[in-house]
Image: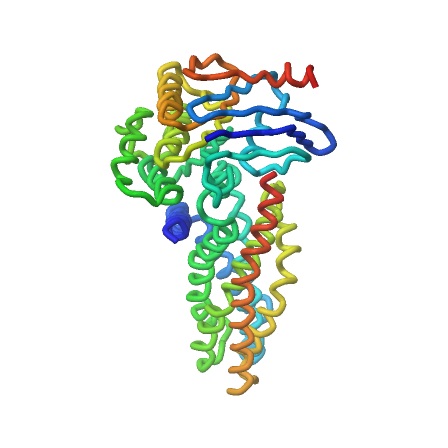
Amino acid sequence: MKSFWALLSRDVRLAVREGGAIGTALGFFLVVVSLMPLGLGPDLNLLSRIAAGVLWIALLLAALLSLNRIFEADHEDGTLDVLATGPLPLELVTAAKSLAHWITTGIPLAIMAPVLGILLNLDLAAYPILVATTLAGTPAVSFLGAIGAALTMKTRRGGLLLALIVLPLYVPTLIFGISAVSAGAGPTGLAASFLILAAISLVAIVLGPLAAAAALKVQLQ
Amino acid sequence: MQLIAEDLVIDRGSRRIIDGLSFAVKAGEALVLTGANGIGKTTLLRTLAGFIRPFRGVIRLDGGDDELTLGEQSHVVGHTNAVKSSLSVAENAGFWNTYLDSGEDSPSRIAASLRHFGLEDLSDFPAAYLSAGQKRRLGLARLLVARRPVWLLDEPTASLDTASSERLVAAVNDHTSSGGLAVIATHLPLGLERARTLDLAAQRMAA
């Protein structure tokens, strides 16, 4: 367990010190969302109707940007070989690294989402729901993304390939994330969507590290 | 303790790299792998570490911990140093100490390993500013921050100066004299005590 925390805190510290990944993700999120009103015109009703969808899609794309670095950096400098021969099973190594990605990317994006909601005239009542759903939904983004990151670890410029592999896996998160935030859902629809969203994240937290570890074992050969 | 490989056959892609290799390394011994580039030294070391599955043959550590794989009882030092540029020298060593060892007296162990490789004055220095040789020494300091019975070293003296190579040789001699064993791929004569040489080229000719 000590090894798990050591790896988690090292990854978080590296992300904070290097800063690039968090900054790029937040900047990309900001730019994509602020382009929307410019492109669609100042129709406030239209904007508030599509706000949830735009925020979720932009959030997923922003999270994708830093996904490829989860394993790539450690593979390049040989750290991954040592991590794999350490006392921690490879499944827990991938879990720790996915969790670090969520802490350094998922949480900042979830906190930023309501700020960007202002740009899209998001309904005021939806703000707490937006924060709750992005926080509950983003673990799936990091843990499923780790599978793609492990598969494309050795590929030069694997970013696009990674997006092709991972984006289809995000469809359930996207659908239930948007339906929870959309005002039309009503209280019962909200509860159902939110619970399914949380369930998707829980399944991803269990299955993502297993699949990513299997992919890493092949890649390390 | 004894590291035994029996009738080892290793393929990479469709090429057979190692064919019918058998050897044994006893505790207190170092095995030096020699042979031209591409003969299979790195492949053999990565197979011993458990990354590559051999096509045929058995690798086992007699007298080791049965609960752990050979890789989990080995220090693996490859061509890369596993050093993070944005962490300081002490943070790099400290991370490997906590991650690999989880044992007692960690601060003194870290300090001793940095001192052995002549890095004690640089401990607060970001690893990004180290020279290639200093980075290599930091990578090698990992051998001493956590105790493991088997060392698998792949050209450990790359980019080291003479004095640093001697520090490495001293570390390996200490390790073998305290009952550890080592397998080292190298092109240079290192002057190790209790070392045997396995020439992979000669072995391939015989096979």
* Foreground residue among B154 and B192: B192
Residue shown at the point (45%, 40%) measured from the top left = B65
Q: What residue do we see at 66% from left, 31% from top? A: B10
Q: Nearer the viewer, residue B109 or A74?
A: B109
Point out residue B76 in the picture as x, y percentages from the top left corner.
48, 33
Q: Residue at x 39, y 44 (%)?
A: B99
The residue drawn where x is 33% and y is 40% is: B94
Q: In this rendering, would A7 be left or right of A158? A: left
- The correct choice, above or below, for B68 with respect to A147 in the image is above
Position above or below: B42 against A80: above
Is residue A48 shown to the viewer in this render? no
* Residue A115 seen in the current view: yes
Q: Within the image, what quadrant is residue B81 found in? A: top left
Give the percent coordinates (x, y) of residue B43. Answer: 60, 29
Instruction: Give the residue at the far right of this rendering.
Output: B14
How far from the left and from the top, in percent, is residue B85? 40, 37
How many tags in the picture?
Answer: 0
**In the figure, residue B29 lies in which quadrant?**
top left
Front in this rendered view, residue B207 or A101: B207
Of A191 and B41, nearer the camera is B41
Q: Quadrant of the C terminus of chain A?
A: top right
Q: Judge from the rendering whether residue A16 lies leftward or rightward of residue B206; answer left or right.
A: left
A37 left or right of A2 in image: right
